[in-house]
Image: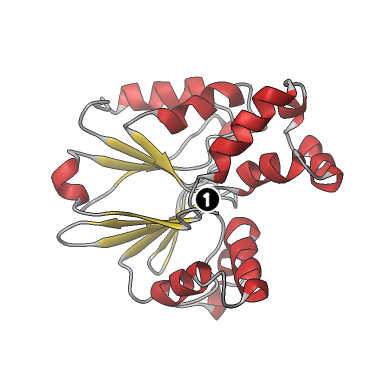
Amino acid sequence: MKEMCKVIQDADLKYQNIYVVGDIHGCYSLLMKELANLNFNFEQDLLISVGDIVDKGPQSYQCLELIDKKWFTMVRGNHEELCIQGNYNSYFRKIHEKYGGEWFYALENTAKNQIVAKLKKLPIMLELHTRRKKIGIVHGDIQLDDWNALKARVEAKNSDVTNTFLTYAEILWGRSRIKSREDYGTVQNIDEIYLGHTVVETMVKLNNCFFIDTGAYQSNHLTLVKLDF
């Protein structure tokens, strides 16, 4: 896995506006509609996805094209990981097909392999630096109350493979912070963290963590947050 944590330096100098979007899940047309409503500037603005741009909705293939746009960046979600693992492993394929991934297995092998190669390059964490803030993006969960400690654990993949794998799986699949809210506090060494994965009716703020997956493929409501940086 390359570039486990992607860092964007001096983001306030590079972009006029920065938005974070919840799980898109194949709802490409809905995303374009919301960007139009925001007067999103494709030359000067940046859109960051918390992952899960594919599956469940009708336009997964179009959503994959977002990865190549200069105005778009993202972290890997568990559904991107299901594409990767399901391409090689029948156990993960069955899970993936059950939860909206049937479109992927209808593709020819060449197309599937090209998609997997692209998804493997996606980071697990993203860190945005501005003059005033450090903002983090992960897909599912953060089980440590220290961003730097989590980042170090993810990046130390050669020193403790088991520990790193568990951390990596927790980030993509976990829900502990939002399910056991009283067990967690403010995450240190980061100003704000944006997450998806767990469907909420409206954005949920837990200390400095913001959960923004509002189940677009069911609710037709895609949450975009304009960052104050």
Query: As rendered, which of 168 and 108 lies closer to the eye?
Result: 108
* Quarter location, residue 190: bottom left
**Residue 85, horizontal then vertical, whole percent:** 72, 46
Left or right: residue 165 compared with residue 181 = right
**Residue 50, horizontal then vertical, whole percent:** 47, 47
Crowding around mark 1 (Cα neighbors within 10 Å: few <14, some 14 to 19, many 20+) is many
Is residue 201 visible to the viewer in this orientation of the structure?
Answer: yes
In which quadrant is the N terminus drawn? bottom right
Q: Residue at x 60, y 70 (%)?
A: 164
Is residue 175 visible to the viewer in this orientation of the structure?
Answer: no
Q: Residue at x 44, y 43 (%)?
A: 74
The residue that label 1 is drawn on is: 196
Q: Residue at x 24, y 34 (%)?
A: 45
Kind of residue sitting beneath label 1:
Gly
Query: As rendered, which of 126 and 28 lies closer to the eye?
Result: 126
**Residue 36, horizontal then vertical, whole percent:** 33, 21
* Quarter location, residue 69: top left
**Residue 122, horizontal then vertical, whole percent:** 50, 46
